[in-house]
Image (tube, grey):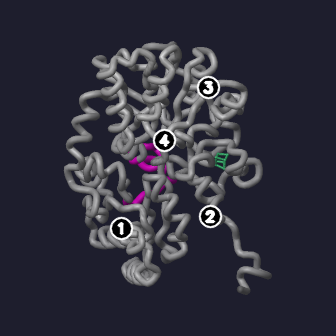
Amino acid sequence: MKFVDEFRQRELADGLAAAIATEADSGRDYRLMEFCGGHTHAIFRYGIQDLMPDNVSFVHGPGCPVCVLPIGRIDNAIKLAVEDEVILCIYGDLLRVPGSGRTSLMKIKASGGDVRMVYSTSDALQIARANPDREVVFFAIGFETTTPATAVALKQARAESLPNFSVFCNHVLTPAAIQNILESPEVREIGSVRIDGFFGPSHVSSVIGSRPYEFFAEEYQKPVVIAGFEPLDVMQAALMLVHQLNSGRHEVENQYTRVVTREGNRKAQRLVAEVFELRRAFEWRGLGLVPYSALKIKSDFADFDAELRFDVPAVSASDVKGCACPQILRGAAKPTDCKLFGTVCSPDNPMGSCMVSSEGACAAYYSYGRFRQPRPDTEAAA
Ligand code: SF4
């Protein structure tokens, strides 16, 4: 398949691995954060860490939209389905994210709540048209990649004067989260988290462009390389980051030129600006309250804002005791640092959001078995 097969070729991967090993200075190490869960998934699926020299390692970031949603917002959605008795339309990833008290939208659905999995915002609109006597709420999540589709749905609902449709908006913004990590005490004061450079997200950057990262590169003196999601994309971006660090540069480079431009998708940006505005602050799992890091629906579209139509209180809820998702999302821990990993917590029985979504670091570690040590009597001998 074009744009896929040519970015998965073994011989080219071997060549890039050799180039990175040559470029990496044995006198130092390189800690590179992949902000985006799509990169985390690719790194584990293709065993990219195993192709790196020992002194090049990946730090997993908070770029999985399901993972960063705080429990309070899941509790809000559960309330909409249970107490307000709406038809709650959600993307499938959200079904099993634990809310307070070990409940989840899957359990609510099993006990009779009208929670419906949709593949697009147009599915949610169609459900609203087909059920004029019911309130239909679309649980909107995601980074800048999915926001334009929600904007289209809101415009469509207004154009049709669809009275029973509204959106519970949880769209979040990448640049604010990266800045929050770089400003965190673990990075700036304690120094327990060291990040030398960033893989910039691919799909997000196709919308916002590469320009928004120029500030971080300059202000925090960290190189950023926008990278695609295929294994050769990630490896080439790693080589570009190591090369920048060796050269003492901190610039924004674009490995994913087949999709991303400096300016991004202007049409999508205009659409988002027409429908959404910045929230003053939004809670992220792991990062806490992050200023200007999320979007809310503009007053022009207030009739379709579920937070205005229903009582949606600010809920503060703690993660499951022992769950290290907050630390993992800040790059301060790995899934294998969590005592629950692979014992109490697994994809079949997730205790935290990082084990639910395929883009979550815990799910990626678990699904691809990268945490397992080879058994000396079998695999090592093979
Ligand atoms: S393994 Fe489970 S409990 Fe531990 S951090 Fe990951 S999601 Fe949370």
Task: State which tag comes first along the sequence, 3 or 1.
Answer: 1
Q: Residues within 10 Å of mark 4 (few under 14, many from 20)?
A: few
Quadrant occupied by the C terminus: bottom right
Mark found first going from the N terminus, 3 or 4: 3
Please tell me whether mark 1 or mark 2 is closer to you in this view: 1
**Whether residue 182 is situated above or below residue 250 in the rendered picture:** above
Badge 2 or badge 4: first in the primary sequence: 4
Disc 1 and disc 2 in contact, CB within 8 angstroms:
no
Residue 25 visible in the displayed image? no
Who is closer to the viewer here, 148 or 354? 148
**Mark 1 vs mark 2: which is more N-terminal?**
1
The secondary structure type at the circle numbered 3 is loop
Looking at the rendered structure, the kind of residue marked 3 is Asp
Q: Split into 4 quadrants, where in the image is the N terminus?
A: bottom left
Q: Amino acid at mark 1?
A: Phe
Q: Residue at x 64, y 39 (%)?
A: 96
Q: Which residue is mark 2?
A: 368
SS category of the residue bearing label 4: loop
Residue at point 55% right, 70% down? 47
Q: Residues in magenta? A: 182-197
Q: Earlier in the sequence, mark 2 or mark 3?
A: 3
Which residue sits at x=44%, y=31%? 170
Secondary structure of the residue carrying tag 2 is helix
Q: Give the Cα separation between the discs numbered 3 and 1.
A: 40 Å
Instruction: Tell me the tag on residue 3.
Output: 1
Name the residue: 27% across, 72% down.
247
- Magenta stretch: includes residue 173: no
Relative depth, front residue between 341 and 302:
302
Residue 114 is marked as 3
Q: Which residue is mark 4?
A: 119
**Residue 295 spot, x, y in % from top left:** 36, 30
